[in-house]
Image (cartoon, rainbow, N blue to C red):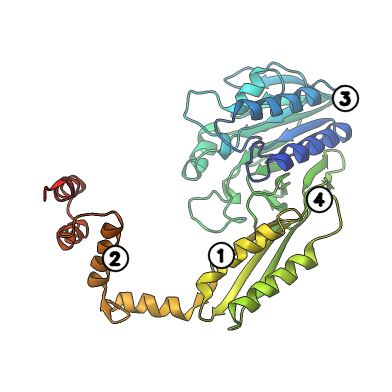
Amino acid sequence: MKIAIVSDMHLGYERFLEDAFAQAKEALEKASAMADAIIVPGDIFDKRYPKPEIIAQAINLFRDISSKTYAASITSYTGNGRIYTKAPIIAIPGTHERIAAGKENAVQLLSLAGLLADTSEATTVISKGNEKVAVFGLGGVSDEMAKDEILRLSPKPVAGAFNIFVLHQSIYEMLPFSDRFIKYSDLPKGFDLYICGHMHSRVEAEVNGKKLLVPGSTVLTQLKGEEQGRKGFILFDTQSYEHKFISIDSRPFIVEEVHTDGAQPDSVVKECENRILKNIPESKRAPIIKLKIFGNATKGYDKIDTATRELAAKYSKKAFIFFDTQQLKSREAEQMINEVRNGKVDDMPVKELGIYMLMNKLNEAKMRKDFKATELFNLLSSGENKEKVIKEASRLLLEED
């Protein structure tokens, strides 16, 4: 049996709203033409509570896909809920769709409408002739609960079937940032294939001697360097135990690194512009370009943010341009931080500078000349409880001449 794995469509993602829909549509249409069944391991939607027009997008997508004729069909379902379709389209909710227990999430609504089978905490069996594929799903849960949920559910393979375990979770070996994440060793044994959503770049690994496949997202959302490859889905063959990646027409994403090396801000901005022009193709789809600026900035670096915004606006009709200046270091900024640590800025004590700034703001607000600015500053910086500060500040502000 051929299984298409299409993940993380993020319908309703506002930054690239049209891309999310168009690329999900292409992926699902290609998948339905090439596969006997489709598995969606979470994050069909970008928001927990999608807008009605986004739910309508999903209904239109899955209505078209579920109404097609497939060589396989759902023959059994074991879980606490019910399904209302035989179409071999299996899904679980992801972390973006997780809501309070006892309430229907957006994926469950699609399942109730008979457009797919929500297989979270359940086993769905798909049959094609004499072949059976059993899919157990674990919808996205909080990272600290994932291991306990797997132990609680204790998923077991179905005898005589090709067994697939599907989840939508952070896994430590892929994202080694927190010891709260589950590890490969926490995944249940005895399954023939493991499928995971959540990660937006493609990953292939081995768990319990079997393949673990992550197809990545169908739309760019995180602007990370590892997402520069093509978007698409995975087509897996249960008979040959082989898989291949099927690409879709996704918008190009390019990351460029610009090193300042002490250059003047104007030179840095000019170099950024050269990189933009280099990556704007003569094609129908404007690329997404991210420029990461590194190094030590000279005097005037604080104007770079304004200049880069102007640059992004200048080429906005030809590309989506984003700047990352978090790694840009400034001697001026470092000097100011040291002065603040030492209690002075431009040889003025920090407290006096604060009072001076507050007085200027009060003058702009046309407060009376004899207003007790120092008393108000001391009150606001006192660390007293919020209620007392509000009460005393209100008294000062409302005090009669």
Q: CA distance from mark 1 to mark 4?
A: 27 Å
Residue 297, relative to residue 14: is it above or below?
below
- The mark nearer the N terminus, 3 or 4, is 3
Task: Inspect the image, locate mark 2, and give the three-letter code of the amino acid beneath it.
Answer: Met
Q: Which residue is mark 1?
A: 306
Give the mark toward the camera: 1 or 4: 1
- Residue toward you, 367 or 252: 367
Residue for badge 2 = 357
Residue 140: quadrant of the picture: top right
Does the CB distance between marks 3 and 4 fall below 8 Å? Answer: no
322 lies above or below 77: below
Q: Secondary structure at mark 1?
A: helix
Label 3: few (<14), some (14–19) or many (≥20) C-alpha neighbours in 10 Å: few
In this figure, which residue is indicated by the disc labeled 4?
Answer: 285
- Element class at badge 3: loop
Neighbor class of circle 4 (other Cα within 10 Å; few <14, some 14-19, many 20+) is some
Please say if 108 is above or below 7. Answer: above
Q: Secondary structure at mark 2?
A: helix
For mark 1, does the 10 Å Cα neighbourhood hold few (<14), some (14 to 19), or many (20 or more) residues?
Answer: few
- The N terminus lies in quadrant: top right
Residue at x 21%, y 60% (from the top left corner): 381
Specify which label sits upstream in the sequence, 4 or 2: 4
Q: Are marks 2 and 1 in contact (CB under 8 Å)?
A: no
Depth check: give the residue in front, 115 or 45.
45
For the residue carrying disc 2, how many other residues have a C-alpha within 10 Å: few (<14), some (14-19), or many (20+)? few
